[in-house]
Image (spheres, rainbow, N blue to C red):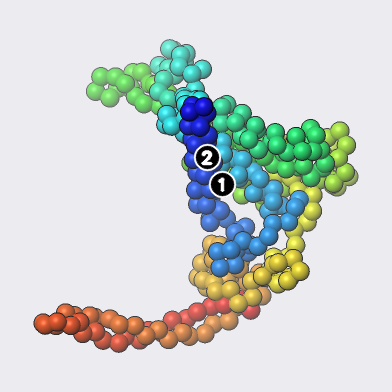
Amino acid sequence: KIATENFFLQLMASCFAVLLESIPCLTCLKICATLCQNNIFVPCFAGTKETAFIYAVTSAGLVHSVTRSCSAGNMTECSCDMNLRHGGSASEGWHWGGCSDDIHYGMSFSRKFLDVPVKNITGKSGSGLAAMNLHNNEAGRQAVAKLMSVDCRCHGVSGSCAVKTCWKTMSAFEKIGRFLKDKYENSIQISDRLKKKLRRKEKSQRKIPIGKEDLLYVNKSPNYCVEDQKLGIPGTQGRECNRTSEGPNGCNLLCCGRGYNTHVVRHVERCECKFVWCCYVRCRRCETMTDVHTCK
């Protein structure tokens, strides 16, 4: 019982780390710019591109977090990838060693944790929406696996690198996030009618295969730029933006092409404070004028 409870606590810690893994990724995405209103996300709509991205990044985050915990020795049920303890290429002067990330355990765990509950509720893959979500879960896992790299350390006299010890390691989650962002921007709309397999909505493109790494969606996204009280979308009118930024907080992106207003804000604050003996602090009142830009 104690061992089970300890594993459960380790599991919860790893799952919580998924959020910590995902946040840096999300903050650098253009998706976040139009969906966030004062750091609060608007509701996600089932079957959209944004939902597809969330499923993928959550699945990838779980794989990344659990696998990293295994390599760090923080989990009792797993460790390094034991399959890469031996072997290599003597002719090329390298061999497997160190602690390779056990991506297989992380992916297996993610499937059990995220996919099995959906299949239990819907029965196998269930509806087209459920099948789409399962596919996007797998796309996130495949992104982590695809971006695995090999790191090596040299050994030899005077740094000659006569022999190298190599191990497999996962990429930084930020890189995985950028990969999934590209997949989001090129996501594929599929038919909501599930037959034997998922297929593209456009009949003329159905002969083009759908890859494991592709993100899929069924429903077109609503217009997040315009306020819609029924859907709970705040829109971007009145949002403060950065006129010179090309990033997520830039006026070009946030204002959705509508332009922006500029007004001057007067700030008054205490400044140049000095301690006067004895015993008080004397300050000046400083005024600054700042240009503030808000979306039209």
Residue type beneath disc 1: Gly
- Using the image as rendered, state which of residue 53 and residue 261 is in the foreground: 53
Relative to 155, residue 291 above or below: below
Q: Amino acid at mark 2?
A: Met
Image quarter in which the C terminus is found:
bottom right
Q: Quadrant of residue 72?
A: top left
The numbered dot on residue 177 is 1
Q: Residue at x 59, y 40 (%)?
A: 60
Q: Residue at x 65, y 33 (%)?
A: 111
What's the CA distance linking mark 2 and mark 1? 22 Å
Q: Residue furthest front?
A: 1
Instruction: Please state which of residues 120 and 243 is positioned toward the viewer in this rendering.
Output: 120
Residue at image position (26%, 86%) is 284
Q: Residues within 10 Å of mark 2 (few under 14, many from 20)?
A: few
Give residue 195's quadrant in the image.
Answer: top right
User: Quick check: 13 above or below 236?
Assistant: above
Decide: is 61 above or below 112: below
Residue position marked by numbered label 2 in the rendering? 12
Q: Could one spot residue 170 in this view of the protein? A: no
Which one is closest to the eye, mark 2 or mark 1? 2
Side of 255 relative to 209 (left or right): left
Rate crowding at label 1 as few (under 14), some (14 to 19) or many (20 or more) other CA atoms within 10 Å: many
Which of 228/252 is in front? 228
- Tag 2 secondary structure: helix
